[in-house]
Amino acid sequence: MSSTPSTTPTGPAQPRPDGPLRVVVAPDSFKGSLSAADVAHAVAAGIRSVVPDAEVVELPMADGGEGTLEALLAVWGVPAREVATVDAIGRPRTARYGVSADGRLGVVELAEASGLPQVSDVALQPLHAHTLGTGAAAAAVLDAGVEEVIVCLGGSASTDGGSGILTGLGARLLDATGAQVPDGGEGLARVARLDLSGLHPRARDVRWRLAVDVTNPLHGERGAAHVFGPQKGAQEADVAFLDDALRRWAGVLAEEAGFDVSELAGAGAAGGVPAAMVGVLGAELEPGARLVAEAVGLPDAIRRADLVVTGEGSFDSQSVNGKVADAMGALAAEAPHRPPVVVLAGRVLLPAHQARDAGIAAAFSIAPGPIELDELLDRTASRLTDLAATVTSLHVASRR
């Protein structure tokens, strides 16, 4: 593992007036090692070891997938709430959700109830898995009185077009005879009508924002079934069946909403969840990292910062394609004085010129040299602290 330093392509940042060093620490988690909050604490400790009176703002981040709930709870300083629900194959499960301290914003993480890890102990059921449990969690958030709901879509175990979420919110999917169809992609093949008479009374009163990091459509060769179905256990025949079912579901949604979601970029995310939520609830699709950044107040914090430090386990080509580091670079570029953004990572694989293009001033690996992965995982926090101290020393020297 080695570091890849680089310089920002936008020219030197304009210095702020003299005053305490202001640093925003906004890392992603180091998967398998530290949570985003733990990474932020370790980096902040390194900064303060060099500049004890530095104003360090710790804002743990996520890209809108798994781990986003934890990051938001850490920033909001509130405990997770829980709701009794079911997993993707209908077994009882307790899922967590979050509500901001002011009660205005709620967050639901699809993986909490309807994720692959929760059903990894049994054979995958691609035709029957559903998002009903996430719908129950969403109903609990609405009951809490929020005005806006963020739904994090990573880790889905199902290909049900989001129908389970609607069912969890009180809707009914009916076949041609008026009977309710089974949950999951299997039921979509028979659905003929959507009954919204029992929909949660607040479901259409709040703003729904979906954290999405793919552009796949609902169905077709690039759709949810073909691209993501095999990851959820779908064989070739299952993929064809599910793709036809999603096509049928799109037609039903179009009749209900007067809007065809078939060509909607991102509608195929998480087994097609956005299709139902956009078609029925008017949900908005947004890049996950940018959505989370706004939820934790990062744009304003970065506008006041002298330095921005982010981090993740592997800094590579995906990092500058809608992930946390990408969002940090974009936000810093929008700030009046363009504070430099530094990435601390377990490994740095991105060429320097690509880092520059993304607005990253420098990227460094925490590996001190050749080292076994297990040893590095054990030393992640201390290495982050040491490296953050080095970066801070360099930054302070450059300000003189």
Image (cartoon, rainbow, N blue to C red):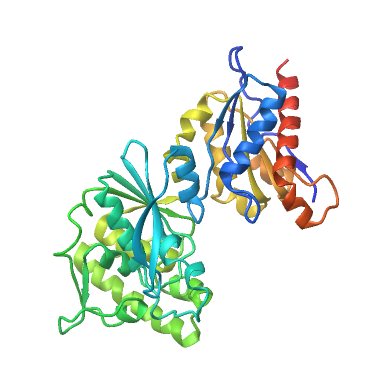
Q: Is residue 359 above or below residue 323?
A: above
* Label total for image: 0
Residue 90 location, x and y as percent?
A: 36, 74
Please indicate, yes or no, whether residue 348 appears anywhere in the rendered image. Answer: no
Residue 268 location, x and y as percent?
A: 42, 66
The image quarter containing residue 176 is: bottom left
Please indicate, yes or no, whether residue 49 appears anywhere in the rendered image. Answer: yes
Q: Nearer the viewer, residue 134 or 220?
A: 134
Residue furthest toward the right? Answer: 370
Q: Is residue 59 above or below residue 168?
A: above
**Left or right: residue 34 compared with residue 294:** right
Q: Is residue 110 above or below residue 186?
A: above
Residue furthest toward the top? Answer: 18
Q: Residue at x 36, y 80 (%)?
A: 244
The image quarter containing residue 21 is: top right
Q: Residue at x 75, y 47 (%)?
A: 379
Residue 385 location, x and y as percent?
A: 71, 36
